[in-house]
Image (cartoon, helix red, strand yellow):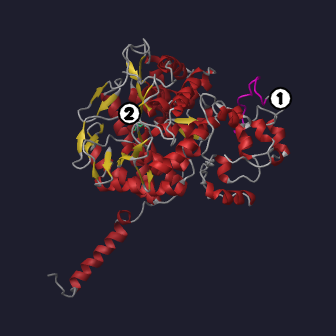
Amino acid sequence: MPSLRRPTSASILVSLLFLFLSVFLCPTLADGVTPEEAKQLRDEVREMFYHAFNGYMDHAFPLDELKPQSCGGEDSLGGYALTLIDALDTLALLGDRDRFSASVEWISKNLQFDINKTVSVFETTIRVLGGLLSAHLIASDYATGMRIPTYDNQLLNLAEDLGRRLLPAFDTPSGIPFGSVNLRHGVDEHESKITSTAGGGTLTLEFGVLSRLTNDSIFEQATKNAVRGLWAQRSKLNLVGAHINVFTGEWTQKDAGIGTSIDSFYEYLLKAYLLFGDEEYLYIFQEAYAAAMQYLYNDPWYVEVNMDSAAVVWPLFNSLQAFWPGLQVLAGDIDPAIRTHTAFFSVWKKYGFTPEGFNLATFSVQHGQRSYPLRPELMESTYWLYKATRDPKYLDAGRDMVASLQYSARCACGYCHIADVESHKQEDHMESFFLAETVKYLWLLFDLAVGPDNLVDNGPYKYIFSTEGHLLPATPEISLVQEHCSYFGAYCNTSNIRQDVLDVATNPRDNLYGRVGTALPSNSRYSDSTPVSGFIKGICPGLTHGQKFGISYISPGHRAHEDDSRNQGEQTNGESHSIVILQSQNSDYSPSENKYHEKLVEPHERKQTSDPPQI
Ligand code: DMJ
């Protein structure tokens, strides 16, 4: 029986002392992250980066990846200093001019892709091609503050060479690429014809940027065909499966979900639109996103269902799903993002890490999916939600993640995979994405809290993150004027556009960034009389903040409210969320006929209408 004795004065004194100590001496233990602590955490994350980066450079380089426990290295992808390439733009983001330029110089002199290696098209694209392109765009541009004076497009040349070596993979009847290709000999005779949806549908950003930098549309076209090929095989419910035969178009794995094998397919639909302004991607994203929210979302979790029947097949959280709330922030769908992040973070809190699989029926770690291979997805969503809401609880979450990594994953020469989230047993491996993404998003989170002074949050361009966390800037060269003209039809109509805008718009050498950019191509349908330009997106009067800066999600039921707010002028919450305007779901899209695409990109049609179309 518990004692009911009255407290003695000694015990009261002890309690008061404890209270004093906890309030005045350790404020951060019980409270949220203070600004001073955010600074310390940012610096701690920077130190984490260097512990791992130096460990890689000292013990593994030029092999692909570090074995952080045994302080060795391994060639896990193609044998071309993968971790260094993947870490390049993080070095630049951290302002490490010396290591950034030394690394660019080494890669320029030593890297070559004429090797007899069969590599994953997806991994090579997101890690190597993306890493090279991002570093090229930083190293070649004064505005980034990290320009390398001696740099002469070496990384772009390497990227182009690599891109051409990957192209044979796209030579399939469906346009969906083979999963692997030999960098010297093309596709192996016995190569598997089965590709994952993420593998075939997460190439558009890197290949699109490559096309725009090299003025060769072949890369962009190949990856767009791949997306069209995948989307053409969607089910009646607008769901896609996990694996597909690239010759027959038949799904060999029909489980639809937002995680494993599919995740970044959704991500690149939206981001390709945001970076390139190509509305075909937006349209597909809207349909795919609406279906995901209808059939996969089980507030606040997501399940996997059969793509035809929507019957639940796997009531599982898998750690790759954790990017989704971040994507929802970009899509402006914040409320479900907040709830889902809270749920996903509760799994992290329970174990100190997220296991690869967590069973939602038993609320326990899924058998065989017990590891945490240093994945970045939860950090990524935490950064985006903090950026959108400035709710300090996301800083607290980030602090917990840093604490787990420092306490349980840090090892002799870097950070170790966690083999089992319950025992925290370490494994001797460090994926290159730890430096490309995991640490990058944590650093950005705390830097944002300190008052951002970094390339992404305070730099010269809007940046889109690739799925590997690589920074792809919306420069005039990449976000071509021509594509963004389509915004003209989406949100503005001729009577809405101020005359001064028209005057400026007729001079294609001016652009959103106030510097000379891409001139309209001579064959452009806008090059003669049509006075439109990319920056019209930001200038039509009466647009909401979200409409000016991106896209934002509103359900059809909220349409009236959105119209009201447009009439009442801009309503900002201080942050530039993107807005997806969700369109009616009965589409007549047919990739083979490409009817819908033509409808979307034909601005002349829409220019005539007085109201913004309901897209
Ligand atoms: C990374 O290579 C990318 O984020 C990819 O989209 C998913 N897998 C890893 C990180 O978990």
The amino acid marked with disc number 2 is: Ser
Query: Residue at label 2?
Result: 432
Report the front residue among 205 and 191: 191
Ligand 1 shown in quarter: top left
Q: Secondary structure at mark 1?
A: loop
In the picture as drawn, the residue positioned furthest to the left comes out as: 1
SS class, disc 2 = loop
Q: Nearer the viewer, residue 313 or 540?
A: 313
Q: Mark 2 or mark 1: which comes first in sequence?
A: 2
Q: Please give the name of the residue rendered at 72% of the width and 56% of the height, measured from the top-left corner.
A: 566
Tell me residue 196's x, y (percent): 42, 31
* Count of marks, rendered view: 2
In the orientation shown, which residue stands out farthest toward the top? 185
Reading the image, the residue beneath label 1 is 528
Q: Residues within 10 Å of mark 2 (few under 14, many from 20)?
A: many
Residue farthest bottom in this picture: 6
